[in-house]
Image (tube, rainbow, N blue to C red):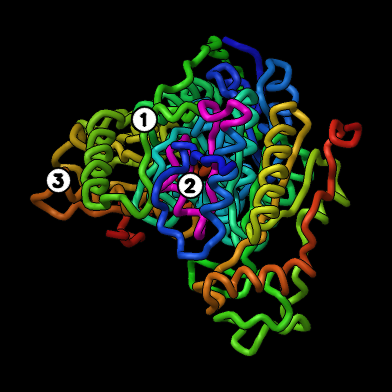
Amino acid sequence: MGDMIKGNIAIAEAAVRAGVQLYAGYPITPSTEIMEYLSGRLPELGRSFIQAESEVSSINMVMGASACGFRSLTASSGPGISLKQECISCISDEELACVVINVVRYGNGLGTLYSSQCDYFRETRGGGNGDYRCIVLSPESIQEAVDLMAPAFDLAEKYRIVTIFMTEGALGQMMEPCDMPDFIEPKRHSWALNGTYSNKKIGIFDRDSMKEAEALNKKHELIKANEQRWESGQVEDADYVFVAFGLPGRSVKGAVKELREEGHKVGFIRPITTWPFPEKAFAEVNPNVKGFISVEANATGQLVDDVALTAKKVINERNVPVWCLPCVYGVPTLKFTKEGFGRIINGELKEVY
Amino acid sequence: MAKERIVPVMSDNPMSFCPGCGHGIVIRLITECLEELNQLDNIIFPIGVGCSSLLGGGLVADRIHCPHGRAASVATGMKRVTPETTIVAYQGDGDAYNIGISETLNAAYRNENITVVTINNSNFGMTGGQMSWTSMPKQKTTTSPKGRDCELTGQPFRFPEMVADQFNIAYSARGSVTSPKNVNKLKRYIKNGIQAQLNGEGYSVIEALSPCPTNWGLNALKAMERVEEELVPFYPLGVFKEREENKNA
């Protein structure tokens, strides 16, 4: 097992090893260590680091580097990612590939410095204006985050789409032992602009939006069919299945273990891709399941919507109730999840759907 | 003897600019300079939003339509990963100086090794002639119907002078398209800007004063006259930051 390393630093080094050629960003807690680390590390390797004047500018620099066919990256948190949405929408529209790291912090507006998952809706629905999705990866540990960094770029390039790397404040700030992946040297993409006009383009007024819509839907369907990732356990005979991602997902696994030991037939699904949502994981669930329970670090419950939609699709002959245990911010403790479960089976907590 | 002027294939396309507009001249000049500098096969254009967007359909070159106002940042990302490629950001005054003032200014602040060409026609052209930061005092636009009130809306400002004065950039100039003489001068400015980039000297900006007959409500000739009579006195033509090699010449 590797050395102890802080989440943000590990993620930044993993990005270096995945071949990131340009990082542009703006400081914001709790993601800043990523840019601090890269400010030294990238120039060391002859690559580009830019401290931009704003979040808006930084993602546009990423767009420029990405258009030229190089692996490019930005990282931020909550409100910083809001500012980037204009360009994320443009990058998506141009079908370029890049990775955007969101070290999620809690709150609306400027928010707080608490760790959270409150940006789930924004990240999994596209985030900016228009009609597109981003692939969203949601690691539960520093090791998983590090292992997902090269795939984050591979997926972005395979589908020419933005990959959102959605971690949490706590994951960025904590330390764990971690093995680092090997260095890879990615090729410059054949679709890149290189100054010779080798790939024909058309102007905005010459676009066929009907045809583009068809292609976009096809791409989304392909991603949904091929790229769902998840971890699940003990769902085949479960009366209740917990659904949680990221650090709450990791915590819920502990709660499931203890509840099983206490005689409750419970299981878990931990989405690793939060988009595409791992619908396939639900196909393995006990058809007589009594309910799904989402555990999430936000105030109002967001993941619960996708759980309910998927439950409806997979178990369509009856209305399986879906509960939500939102811990608002931080990482839910085993006690929090177990007490919530107790209230659910005692009929004290109303289902959301 | 009359000399035939051949427009480079890169810009020899209909681009649906209004009759009497200056955009077409400036685009031709840029591509002529690229040809003379052997850069026709080594050029990427980050393109602004507005009338500049029309380049997206007409220019036969690597190009990308940038978010509104952000072309200098997109150009920065491009230049950092492919320093050997020539990058010319093409923007209007609304794009570069209003919504994009932060990105435009900060690229100059970093002395980014890119060339920015801005078309200053003293209004937002594509959206139908709204007031821009370069609209003249008392200028009537669709959002200043009684004439621009500078007490409330601020003064027009001179970007090339500002960055020449404040930042350590390579080259800054303003030209216009109102006469063959001015067009030739403007071409010289653009060529110097691109040459500065080729030499790795840093940031260059060339502003081109351009008529907008449609939105000014003037015919093509009167619009040219307005550039000369109203704009040039406030936006002087010339070089504001000279390149080192020209100083010694």
Q: Quadrant of the C terminus of chain B?
A: top right
User: Secondary structure under badge 1?
Assistant: helix
Is label 1 or label 2 in front?
Answer: 2
Output the chain of dot 2: B
Task: Check residue B65 in the rendering and tell me which mark sits there, or answer none.
Answer: 2
Residue A198: quarter of image: top left
Task: Check residue B58 in the rendering and tell me which mark sits there, or answer none.
Answer: none
**Of residues A206 and B104, which is closer to you in this image?**
A206
Q: CA distance from mark 2 to mark 3?
A: 46 Å
Q: Residue at x 66, y 18 (%)?
A: A4
Badge 1: how crowded within 10 Å, few (<14), some, or many (20+)?
Answer: few
Is residue B121 placed above or below A14 in the rendered structure? below
- Asked if residue A23 lies left or right of residue B239, the reply is left
* Residue A66 seen in the current view: yes
Residue stretch rendered in magenta on the structure:
B35-64
Residue A220: quarter of image: top left
Q: Which residue is mark 3?
A: A315
User: Type of residue at label 1?
Assistant: Glu
Q: Which residue is mark 1?
A: A261
Output the chain of dot 3: A
User: Type of residue at label 3?
Assistant: Ile
Residue A53, position in %: x, y? 72, 47
Badge 2: how crowded within 10 Å, few (<14), some, or many (20+)?
Answer: many
User: Secondary structure under badge 2?
Assistant: strand
